[in-house]
Image (spheres, rainbow, N blue to C red):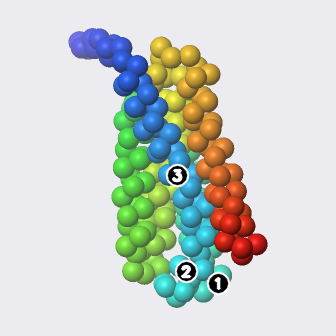
């Protein structure tokens, strides 16, 4: 016999917006990570005594599991629950980010970056579904996609634009 489960109670408007905020904040962290790491590569190289040729592993250790597990994470979300996979991925990403910040060796940093890629794939593989379709059922779809797409766009373009504005305002450019 299988136990029947009742559908979750409808979310209030406040709960919907909080959920959308959490989703967008998680995605913003994952997208900005690539920019932050690329800017920090010279400091990472100096602090952890990376050779120039080995420095690529700091970036690749994230990209390989991220790209390789993206589809698998989406399917796992279908099977095990999207909210559960998204939350787990976000926790893995945050813990791995902390480990990256505390890394005292090249190996520890590369291992933590690998875990960041796993967490990023778990979160990104499910983000658009949760933000746009599944998690906030009663809101209009375009209303859900707008904040998510805005977060993605601003995190990709906002950092370089902010950097140019900062350089111009300080007179360095």
Hey, which quadrant is residue 57 in on the image? Answer: bottom right
- Residue reaching furthest to the right: 173
Q: Position of residue 138 (x, y in %)?
A: 47, 14
Residue nearest the observer in this picture, 84 or 79: 84
Q: Is residue 88 left or right of residue 169?
A: left
Q: Position of residue 139 (x, y in %)?
A: 51, 17
Q: Residue at x 60, y 80 (%)?
A: 42
> Would you call the spot at circle 3 few (<14 residues within 10 Å), some (14-19), or many (20 or more)?
many
Q: Secondary structure at mark 3?
A: helix
Say the numbered circle drawn on residue 87.
none
Q: For residue 24, say whether it is visible.
A: yes
Q: Earlier in the sequence, mark 3 or mark 1?
A: 3
Hey, which quadrant is residue 77 in on the image? Answer: top left
**Residues under numbered marks 3 and 1 in contact, where contact means CB atoms less than 8 Å apart:** no
Q: Earlier in the sequence, mark 2 or mark 3?
A: 3
Q: For residue 72, say whether it is visible.
A: no
CA gap between label 3 and label 1 equals: 25 Å
Say the numbered circle drawn on residue 43.
2
Pointer 1 residue: 52
> Would you call the spot at circle 1 few (<14 residues within 10 Å), some (14-19), or many (20 or more)?
few
Closer to the eye: label 3 or 1: 3
Pointer 3 residue: 30
Q: Secondary structure at mark 2?
A: helix
**Residues under numbered marks 2 and 1 in contact, where contact means CB atoms less than 8 Å apart:** no
């Amino acid at each position: 016999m299988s136990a029947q489960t009742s559908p979750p109670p409808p979310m209030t408007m406040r709960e919907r917006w909080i959920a959308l905020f959490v989703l967008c904040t998680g995605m913003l962290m994952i997208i900005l990570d690539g920019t932050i790491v690329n800017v920090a590569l010279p400091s990472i190289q100096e602090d952890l005594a990376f050779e120039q040729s080995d420095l690529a592993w700091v970036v690749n250790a994230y990209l390989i599991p991220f790209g390789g597990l993206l589809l698998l994470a989406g399917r796992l979300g279908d099977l095990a629950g999207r909210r559960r996979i998204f939350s787990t991925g976000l926790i893995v990403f945050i813990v791995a980010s902390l480990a990256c910040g505390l890394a005292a060796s090249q190996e520890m940093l590369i291992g933590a970056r690998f875990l960041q890629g796993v967490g990023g794939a778990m979160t990104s593989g499910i983000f658009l579904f949760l933000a746009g379709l599944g998690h906030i059922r009663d809101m209009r779809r375009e209303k859900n996609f707008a904040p998510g797409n805005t977060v993605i766009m601003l995190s990709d373009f906002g950092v370089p634009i902010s950097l140019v504005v900062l350089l111009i305002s300080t007179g360095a450019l």
